[in-house]
Image: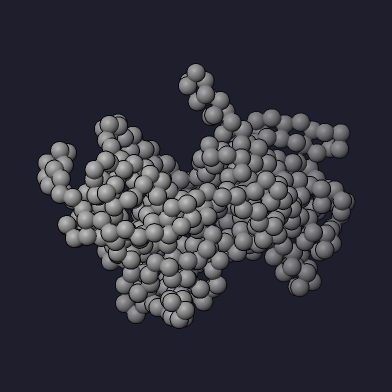
Amino acid sequence: MEFLSGIFSSLWSIFMIVLFFGGSIFVHELGHFLAARRRGVKVSRFSIGFGPAIWSRTGKDGVEYRLSWVPLGGYVALPQLADMAAIEGESEGMAELPPISYSTKVIVFAAGAFFNVLFAFFLASILWVVGQPAIEEEQTTRVGFVHKQIELPDGKMADGPAYLAGIQSGDTILSVDGKTVKTLGDIGQLVVLGGGRDPQGRPSVEIEFEHEGERKRAKLSPELVGAEGNREIGIEAAAKVTIAGVLAGQPAELAGLKFRDVLTHINGQAIGYVGFISDYIRTNGAKPVKLTYLRDGQIGDVTVTPANVRDPEMKADVYRLGVSLKGGLTLKTIRTPPWEQVWDKAVWTWRTLQSLLNPGSSVGISKLSGPVGIGRIYWDASKAGIRYVLWIAILVNVNLAIFNLLPIPVLDGGHILFATVAKLRGRALPVNFIAATQSVFIILLFTMILYVTAFGDIRRWIRDVKADAQEKAAVEQKKTAAPAKP
């Protein structure tokens, strides 16, 4: 039964990739196709993918419809607008067909991106109705927890940048590098994509925050963390730490703590994760601690003196309160208007492009995702649920729209650029110049895609597979381990 369930899950994920990733490409090309037909432009081929055809059929309208072997996009062959024989194969020469107006060229080339935005808006409207899963504690800029130290890629620990800057739990972040933020996700995004550097060349970011009603500004030096080396300042939403069990006769029970009490503070410090209490008691030993808890909507305080007990696993004396804890974040459903969803994705995409072009940023081409990486993202999202797939599809379509409008030869924006230059100079650009330029950029584009796939997508895939294997091995070893017992 488990085997069949795995097969069904895999087939569902593949279906989601084909439907939404392939569908996004289809919608883009459909925009070109419909606009060309509407404006009376000759269409010789409609292809999903590049290279030799897997399947091909010529319709009554004279258009060859095909599915090609290289799944890195698609194209509509428009010989009157652009001779792209280098990647589209043989096509009718431009000289044999009547000329097309400048406005028609712009409309047809821009139609692909326009259709992607329309598709994104349509999907965002569905997500608006059904609701989007979100972590409640992250739908604010109020800091839940500040890490005193954060782990670097080499395993060493460094002081948390936010902690060094004086940011504390409960403070509200107002802006990052002058940009207003609405959620903790916005903060993380702006920090990662930031391009600031201090005089010593270290990453730098300016944070404006509110502490006890007072506005403050601080310059932070983010650390590069994780396998990707992303910028991090060491703040996050506070996880809800709940008592999962109380041991009879132990300090917690004697102090009056009960099952399902939510622990919020220890000696006035916010409890941000399950192990925080254990870490605190390990440092303070047998000293009494004041615990603030939430029970049935009411806030209470108790003072508990940890007991000295023998831990058989550690083979040492440790201090315990006698409770089992569990932690987690609250999942809620939010409904964001479709125009806001599309605009947020556009802003995110534009900031990413700016970061890529900024020599001071820590974001490089290898951190982008190619077709393999996007497919994996869809795969993972399909495991989590259709609403996550919709969210990814909206982002991908907005990305496609903006990327294709960049003034780069081969892309739609490059064709618009050529058409605009020809319009301004009063005559068409030399065919040889266009062909040579397109050939160069075709090579550059495919080289970039291969680089991102090999050194980004596949490298991350191998690393994640190894990490999953190690995690599964660790889980097998700790299957009988008890929950955390401070």
The image's colour scheme reads one colour
Which quarter of the picture shows residue 113?
bottom right
**Which residue is depicted at the point 29% across and 64% down?**
267
**Which residue is depicted at the point 44% across and 65% down?**
143
Q: Position of residue 289 (x, y in %)?
A: 25, 60
107 shown above or below 122 = below
**Which residue is depicted at the point 19% across and 60% down?**
287
Which quarter of the picture shows residue 465?
top left
**Which residue is depicted at the point 34% across and 46% down?**
325
442 shown above or below 406 = above
Task: Using residue 161 as the reference point, say whether residue 94 is left or right of it.
Answer: right
Residue 83 seen in this snapshot: no
* In front of the other: 345 or 369: 345
Q: Where is residue 441 in the image (x, y as percent from the top left)?
A: 58, 56
* In front of the other: 6 or 260: 260
Q: Position of residue 248 (x, y in %)?
A: 26, 40
Q: Which residue lies furthest to the top in this view?
A: 1
Task: Using residue 56 as the reference point, say whether residue 320 is left or right of it.
Answer: left
Task: Using residue 454 as the reference point, say whether residue 385 is left or right of it.
Answer: right
346 shown above or below 458 = below
* In front of the other: 307 or 179: 307
Residue 390 seen in this snapshot: yes
Q: Position of residue 20 (x, y in %)?
A: 64, 41
Total numbered labels: 0
